[in-house]
Amino acid sequence: MLALALLAAGLAGPLLRPGTCAAWIAPMAAAAAALTTGLVDTGEATDAVAALAEPILFLLAAVPLAARLDRLGFFDAAAARTRGRWAPATLWGLASVTVAVLNLDAAVVLLTPLYVRCARCWGVDPVPYAFAPALVACLGSSALPVSNLTNLVFVEHFDLAPSRFLAVLGVPTAVALLVGFAAWRLLVRPTVPAAGAPARATDRSALMSGGAVLAVTAAGFVAGRAVAVAPWVVAITANVTLEVLLRRRGHQSPVWRDVPWGAAGLVAALAVLAHGAGDALPLNDLLGRIGERGDPVLAALVGAGAANLVNNLPALLLGLAALGDAGASAVAWAYLLGVNIGPLLLVTGSLSGILWLDAARKEGLRIGPARYLAVGLAVGGPASAASVAALAIGG
């Protein structure tokens, strides 16, 4: 019970904290309590964090990469090229590409304030547009290994090629994004800006140079594993390239300013807390029975539930023990898909949800967990069902 209570405290802390208190403080304090009380010993904690070494390194490199693209003017230029009736589709598409290539956590940190600023510039309600990055972060984060930290763990565990990953989850991800976009337009109803709405300044050179770096980086993510180049190495290389471009433009900023140390600490703390609570959860037995039945739909439901209960990254780590390492079965793929999409229900279900809520509140939007749940059900319900159905049919 103490292990579950500490895990609950670690997840609730980022929501209940005072506005000036960093999101990582409560999870880190709970993890420290788990170590102090002996619920998790130092060796177990080290193993739990070591299993996330590559995903954490990628997180530390991907967020600065996205921040440098933003400083270059790439995202502003991309968003500025749309107004009128194409605005919702263009912003949804920009979020989809950013999540797929640069990781969902980086996407919500940068696109949420951008979309709020766009909506205010157009004179429309910014809340529906602010939700777009959060929705796409879950619906579109199963396309490539780098799209989600859970994917990197999954690929490493089963030793998968990026092409195999895209072949299995590419269509379900596309289905989720298409159905999610339709639900977002019909049920959340972002106001379409008038044709004469004020235009945002466009920097064509930023769009071209940033787009070129993004395209080469995406190719590096896909091809890198074949030559034993980790995604975080590709991301660091792209960071160096962008830093050179920025310095040529006269931009000077501290190199470490954009590194998300707090977010990395939060991920590590949740891994320790989930490890401590693992024995109190029936996840292994449940997944074992589902594996025997070979039911991907039920596996996806369990994955979604586990992500909302303990956060998606710890949920995957706990589930991998039951899934085994002989090969990625249909049940394993479905569980991963559920873990990725599931956090549309509770904002604490993923790091991206916690980061998104922070970004939205910094923009002055009064959005709470209840509103997140309502929008997540409206959009994520039909999108998740369609995505899991596409996986089951294709598998």
Image (cartoon, grey):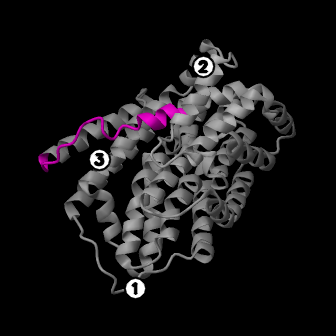
Residue drawn at 30 percent across, 35 percent down: 256
Q: Position of residue 58 (x, y in %)?
A: 44, 35
Magenta region, residue range: 248-267
Q: Which mark is residue 45?
A: 2
Identify the disc placed on residue 59: none
Secondary element type, mark 3? helix
Q: Residue at x 51, y 41 (%)?
A: 23
The answer to which of marks 3 and 2 sits earlier in the sequence is: 2
Please state which amino acid type lies under the numbered disc 2: Ala
Of residues 103 and 145, the one nearer the viewer is: 103
Q: Quadrant of residue 48?
A: top right
- Give left or right: position of 327 versus 86: right
Residue at the image point whose x is 59% and y is 56% from the top = 139
Can you say which quadrant of the picture contains the N terminus? top right
Which residue is identified by label 3?
Answer: 68
- Of residues 177 and 276, the one nearer the viewer is 276
